[in-house]
Image (spheres, coloured by chain):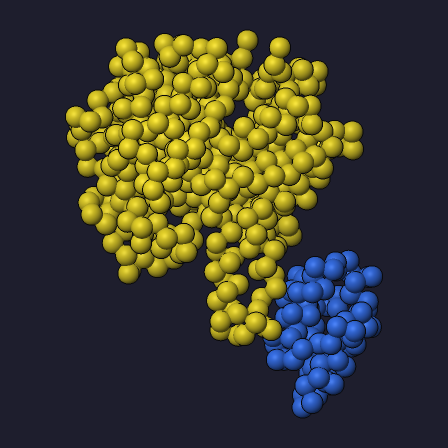
Amino acid sequence: MPKDSNLEAEIKELVSGVTAIPIEKLKSDVDIFAELGVDSLKAIEIVAAFERRYRVVVPEKEIPNIRTVKQIADMAAKLIK
Amino acid sequence: MDKKIVITGLSVIAPNGIGKLEFFKALKEGRSGVKSITRFDTNEFKAKLAGEVSDFKPEDFLGAKVTRDLNRTTRFLCSAAKLALEDAHLTINDENTDQIGVCTGTTLSSLWNIAEFDKEVINDGPLFTNVALFPGTVVNAASSQVSILLNIQGFNATISTGFTSSLQALKYATDLIRSGRVKAVVLGAVETLSLANFIGFYNLGFLAGIRGEEISCPFDKRRNGIILSEGAAVIIIEDEEYAKKRGANILAEIKGVASYFDAYRMGKYQPDAKGLKECMGDVLRKSHLKASDIDYINAAGNSVGEQDKLETSAIKEVFSRAAFKTPVTSIKSMIGEVFSASGMLQLASAVASITESFIPPTINYRIKDPDCDLDYVVNTSREKKVNNVLINNLGPGGNNASCIVSSYH
């Protein structure tokens, strides 16, 4: 299982790739939707890219809860197990 | 008295010129936009050429951020739409946004997205497909983005009738202006080159180079198929009163549009071109013009053996004595067959003729065909004061459309 800090770095790269937001702006606890202007269509793309990358399916009800890089990384850690 | 519909601006993304000025110049110079295909590998095919659009930088028109999320089709159409609105000096705001519509002719332009999306489903399974590709798989994706990016909130419609999409989109748009639904329409058309649509036309035997020389030479004896192309054109059309009230510069007038469906057999032309003849006759009547009033015919002729012959004989029957005195030209000799977008590019070229007094040439003409014996304005453009242009669109399968565009007085 990947180390937490590596996983967060991977997630930052993934989100940056989908949204074109520079990695430096993607701090662990920043709400990427409320604070960085990522819209709902991009949100779906982030989830899809995440699912592709880690070969997991994110349960529908969890999606509203993953708003920061740290929360996405925690979800990844849980699902990849 | 019917409302007059006028043209106040336009732009094109064409294989031989990007933007209105470059396109008009290319038409006058008889410049071809046909080149070796770079967008995909053609090793397996006997055909290797297309009217591919090159040197197109959408970032210059739309900005890098917006461009990033749009597919090629949408980049073409939105760039042309933005430039056309600038050409017409028409600013969209809260007051007029509901009075302006978007109408787009396109049929195959979403094929690339469909193919890429399906490839990923096959390779990675349905759960892991690339979501970002999905919105572009619908045929009205590009048209929708025009409304979204330019904040145009009147109607939005996509007309997908293949070869006649452009002129039928024109008909739809003019009907909505005439009925008072809107005052102006961002009227456009687009097609993009992709391996999927290339293979489609290739396997149907429709492309030049399979059984003969790979060249777009309408009305020439060597003609043996189309050179497939891509491109976009957007024309701003308005209710004359609205245009005058806002002080618009009027470039030309749409005198009339007609269409006729004469399906015969799958993928075959009606042997006596009944539909095209009806169209041309109908549009002359609607425009209150005689055949001898037409300064030239902007033909559908696309280097397909049977089609060029049919159009020639239809013109002779409708125009009778005037046929041999009316120049007939095909800009598809320069830009190839852009399918759903050809009609809109033809309309743009007709405006060029009217505003700059010339008839674009039918280039690549060398060998005469006794079945095609009209004046095709061969190889070099001709200076002439042009007041009325008849434009034809047709294809196998039954769709025919004609329109007349005239100088504005």
The C terminus of chain B: image quadrant: top right
Q: Residue at x 64, y 50 (%)?
A: B66
Q: Position of residue B295 (x, y in %)?
A: 38, 14
Q: Residue at x 80, y 69 (%)?
A: A64
Q: Nearer the viewer, residue B357 or B317?
A: B317
Height in image: B191 above or below A6? above
Q: Nearer the viewer, residue B206 or B93?
A: B206
Height in image: B159 above or below B259? below
The N terminus of chain B: image quadrant: top right
Q: Position of residue A76 (x, y in %)?
A: 71, 81
Q: Residue at x 51, y 58 (%)?
A: B114
Q: Is residue B87 visible in this depiction of the protein?
A: no
Q: Nearer the viewer, residue B171 or B282?
A: B282
Height in image: B346 above or below B46? above
On the rendered structure, is B276 left or right of A35?
Answer: left
Q: Is residue B139 visible in this depiction of the protein?
A: yes
Q: Position of residue B256 (x, y in %)?
A: 50, 19
Q: Residue at x 78, y 75 (%)?
A: A62
On the rendered structure, is A30 left or right of B41?
Answer: right
On the rendered structure, is B313 left or right of B336?
Answer: left
Total labels drawn:
0
Q: Position of residue B126 (x, y in %)?
A: 57, 72
Residue B214 figure quarter:
top left
Residue B363 figure quarter:
top left
Height in image: B79 above or below B272? below
- In the picture, which chain is yellow? B
Q: Nearer the viewer, residue A53 or B264?
A: B264
- In the picture, which chain is blue? A
